[in-house]
């Protein structure tokens, strides 16, 4: 790795923002950004699961898939691991911390189908990261995800009181806004 | 043969391993959830409208089972849902009276004066930020329809005269309009309430007379006229006690501005 840690983290959070530049995890980006509360809840749950799944998938890839020559089963295996992990985490959180469960509860099952979680797990392998880079990359991408969620939620909370033409109200304007935010992040493309 | 066997074996082992972990976890991390909560949640409408004050229908169901909320906590569901909930819990549903929202302002565009012409975001809450709203009366309806836009049941509509109308059939008394209105002009009252003073102004009579033709002056004639003592004047505003009012109509006749009105014959 020639890149410094600082640039590595900055790149994962902003320059190659997982949501706005790589377009992974757009379902929650449009689904739960109508209010700041739910956007923050989803972000927190995502940071948590993203790190766990990134690390677990990395270990499984190195320990099982690579040694047995089963790289082509990566997609299937990762989906299994992530789905199982989310279920497991949900059960543990419900038992250990009811308060956290109430805060994250409804977002946890949604994460099973969050493309970002799977995308990051695959990117970790594809970019050939070592263990530390996997951990840092998982945290940083999830932070980038949270950043985009918070920006979007802030804008949509303002839109809720604006006078918006009927044909644009709701998802259409959400998509246009997402595109605009994405464009502004593209201004940083190539910074290294 | 080789690679297929390895692939099947590896994925099988992974699946098996995960299912064993989940199976064990479901026993180890088992949390007792009252089965009645799911049963109650099943009979609730499931719209998650939030009218009950809880985060959603399942939250409301939990509160009902724990006894924190009454069986008729779901306003949107009405009597039929309250009965179903009571059936699940094995208690009888006290026949709670249906409630509806009423607009406590009669100062429409022709009757109430405006201080200035408001041009801005079409929302009462935004209009409130500009010198406290464009209406001369600081208690009256601003008429921009924040309640109409936020009614989850489409029970409100904006009339030509700049005052919202309530559709009694559709209104579920969820209270959303009461919450979103920056002046809290809609109020939830029993559907059988026969008379009400449809004004929210606590200004003194002289001022009210100058700025609105349909404002309560606080004169107290209604209070004197009422044989049941159901009318009180609180800070220059007459208030009808629904439990005492018999709907005799004596107060309507005396009211100089006509804002005490029969809710039965003159549905607003």
Image (cartoon, rainbow, N blue to C red):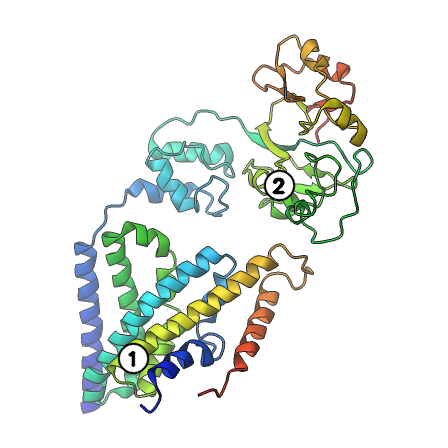
Residue B205 is left or right of residue B93, and the answer is right
Q: Whole-percent x and y of residue B90?
A: 33, 30
User: Which quadrant of the view contains residue A56?
Assistant: bottom left
Label 2 Cα neighbours within 10 Å, binned few <14 / some 14-19 / many ≥20: many
x then y, percent, for residue A81: 27, 72
User: In the image, what residue occupies the spot 23% across and 49% down?
Assistant: B31
Rounded to the nearest angstrom, the CA distance separating label 2 from label 1 is: 50 Å
Give me the residue at 34% from left, 45% from top. Answer: B38
Q: Is residue A77 visible?
A: no
Say whether mark 1 and mark 2 are on the same chain.
no
Quarter of the figure with the N terminus of chain B? bottom left
Left or right: where B130 falls relative to B16: right
State which chain disc 2 sits on. Answer: B
Which numbered dot is residue A134? Answer: 1
Label pair 2/1, CB-CB below 8 angstroms = no
Relative vertical location of residue B208 with respect to residue B57 in this rendering, above or below = above
Can you identify the residue that label 2 sits on?
A: B181
- In-image side of B221 versus A4 (left or right): right
Between B141 and B265, the one nearer to me in the picture: B141
Q: Chain of mark 1?
A: A
Q: Secondary structure at mark 1?
A: helix
Rendered residue at 39%/83% (across/down):
A7
Label 2 SS: loop
């Amino acid at each position: 790795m020639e890149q410094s840690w600082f640039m590595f983290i900055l790149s994962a959070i902003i320059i190659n923002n997982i949501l706005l530049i790589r377009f992974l995890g757009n379902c929650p980006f449009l689904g739960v950004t109508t209010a700041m509360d739910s956007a923050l809840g989803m972000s927190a749950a995502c940071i948590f699961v993203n790190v766990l799944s990134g690390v677990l998938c990395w270990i499984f890839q190195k320990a099982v898939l690579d040694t047995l020559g089963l790289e082509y089963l990566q997609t299937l295996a990762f989906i299994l691991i992530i789905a199982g992990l989310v279920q497991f985490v949900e059960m543990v959180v419900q038992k250990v911390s009811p308060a956290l469960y109430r805060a994250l509860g409804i977002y946890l099952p949604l994460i099973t189908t969050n493309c970002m979680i799977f995308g990051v797990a695959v990117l970790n392998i594809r970019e050939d990261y070592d263990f530390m880079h996997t951990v840092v990359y998982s945290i940083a991408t999830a932070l980038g995800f949270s950043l985009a969620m918070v920006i979007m939620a802030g804008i949509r909370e303002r839109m809720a009181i604006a006078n918006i033409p009927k044909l644009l109200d709701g998802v259409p304007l959400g998509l246009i806004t997402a595109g605009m935010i994405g464009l502004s992040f593209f201004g940083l493309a190539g910074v290294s | 043969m080789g690679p297929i066997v390895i692939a099947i074996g590896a994925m099988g082992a992974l699946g098996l391993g995960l299912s064993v972990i989940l199976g064990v976890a479901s026993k180890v991390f088992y949390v007792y959830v009252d089965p009645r909560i799911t049963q109650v949640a099943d009979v609730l409408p499931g719209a998650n409208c939030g009218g009950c004050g809880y985060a959603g229908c399942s939250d409301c169901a939990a509160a009902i089972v724990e006894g924190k909320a009454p069986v008729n906590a779901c306003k949107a569901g009405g009597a039929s849902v309250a009965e179903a909930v009571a059936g699940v819990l094995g208690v009888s549903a006290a026949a709670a009276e249906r409630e509806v929202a009423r607009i406590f302002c009669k100062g429409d565009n022709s009757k109430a004066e405006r201080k200035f012409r408001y041009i801005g975001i079409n929302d009462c809450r935004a209009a409130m930020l500009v010198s406290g709203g464009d209406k001369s009366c600081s208690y009256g309806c601003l008429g921009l329809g924040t309640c109409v836009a936020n009614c989850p049941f489409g029970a409100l509509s904006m009339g030509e005269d700049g005052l919202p109308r309530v559709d009694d059939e559709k209104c579920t008394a969820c209270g959303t309009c009461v919450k979103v209105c920056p002046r809290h002009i809609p109020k939830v009252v029993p559907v059988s309430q026969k008379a009400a003073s449809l004004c929210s102004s606590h200004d003194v009579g002289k001022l009210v007379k100058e700025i609105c033709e349909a404002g309560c002056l606080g004169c107290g004639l209604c209070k004197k006229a009422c044989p049941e003592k159901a009318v009180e004047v609180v800070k220059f505003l007459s208030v009808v006690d629904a439990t005492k009012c018999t709907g005799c109509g004596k107060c309507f006749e005396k009211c100089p501005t006509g804002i005490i009105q029969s809710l039965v014959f003159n549905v607003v």
